[in-house]
Image (tube, rainbow, N blue to C red):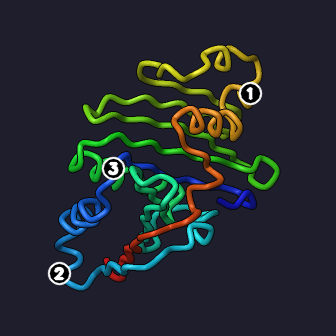
């Protein structure tokens, strides 16, 4: 995955059956697909084209999902919305009853409001959320029971930017067996969902 971004958010579904994932997306968006308000294209996506998503919610949502040879038991999800279409991801997860991870990373030198997020929800929909972000000031927030791979000493640091940042998120993902740098490598199947009308 590219390291040249201001903002990047993506999700990982722990599921090996990509066809089941696609079928679930089609069920969720059945009405929009039947009425021609949306289309799904089977194609190998370019995830790097989805970095720096547009802020706000007035534009038509688009998202891309793919599976690669490196992580055959995972499906990756990226969208053109700054929040990563988190509500859509949760709906998909509830249908599939699988684990999901959502990460948000920022380049602090290129954005006025950096946002870092690590979210995990298991198949029982038990959630863990950690965030560090800047509005008027830096804010650190956590919710849910800490996971076994977390380093709780990080959250005691004085500077909020040292409690959760790109490096810590990447470290947590490595502990979960995922190298962010390789999630877009050796893609073997993918789809792109495009909303065309409201």
- Residue 54 in view, yes or no: no
Quarter-wise, where is residue 132 in the image?
top right
Viewer-side residue, 62 vs 23: 23
The quadrant of the image that shows the C terminus is: bottom left
What is the secondary structure assignment of the residue under circle 1? helix
Badge 3 crowding class, 10 Å Cα cut-off, few under 14, some 14 to 19, many 20 or more, is many
Choose the circle earlier in sequence order: 1 or 3: 3
Q: Looking at the image, is 144 positioned above or below residue 10?
A: above
- Residue 116 falls in image quadrant: top right
Cα distance, mark 2 to mark 3?
26 Å
Q: Nearer the viewer, mark 1 or mark 3?
A: 3
Looking at the image, which residue is at 63% across and 30% down?
139
Callout 2: 10 Å neighbours few (<14), some, many (20+)? few
- The CA span between labels 1 and 2 is 48 Å
Which residue bears the numbered disc 2? 34
The residue under label 3 is: 15
Task: Give SS at disc 3.
Answer: loop
Q: Residue furthest bottom?
A: 36
Q: Earlier in the sequence, mark 2 or mark 3?
A: 3
Residue sitting at x 64%, y 40%: 170
């Amino acid at each position: 995955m590219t390291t040249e971004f201001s903002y990047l958010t993506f999700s990982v579904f722990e599921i090996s059956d990509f066809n089941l994932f696609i079928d679930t997306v089609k069920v969720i968006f059945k009405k929009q697909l039947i009425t021609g308000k949306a289309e799904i294209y089977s194609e190998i996506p370019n995830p790097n084209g989805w970095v720096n998503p547009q802020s706000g919610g007035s534009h038509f949502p688009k998202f891309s999902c793919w599976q690669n040879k490196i992580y055959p038991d995972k499906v990756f999800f990226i969208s053109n919305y700054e929040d990563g279409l988190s509500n859509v991801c949760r709906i998909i997860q509830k249908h599939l009853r699988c684990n999901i991870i959502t990460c948000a990373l920022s380049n602090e030198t290129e954005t006025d409001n950096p946002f870092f997020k690590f979210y995990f929800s298991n198949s029982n929909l038990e959630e863990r959320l950690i965030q560090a972000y800047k509005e008027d000031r830096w804010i650190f927030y956590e919710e849910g029971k800490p996971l076994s791979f977390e380093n709780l000493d990080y959250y005691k640091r004085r500077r909020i930017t040292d409690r959760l940042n790109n490096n810590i998120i990447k470290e947590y993902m490595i502990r979960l067996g995922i190298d962010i740098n390789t999630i877009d490598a050796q893609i073997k199947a993918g789809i792109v969902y495009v909303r065309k009308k409201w």
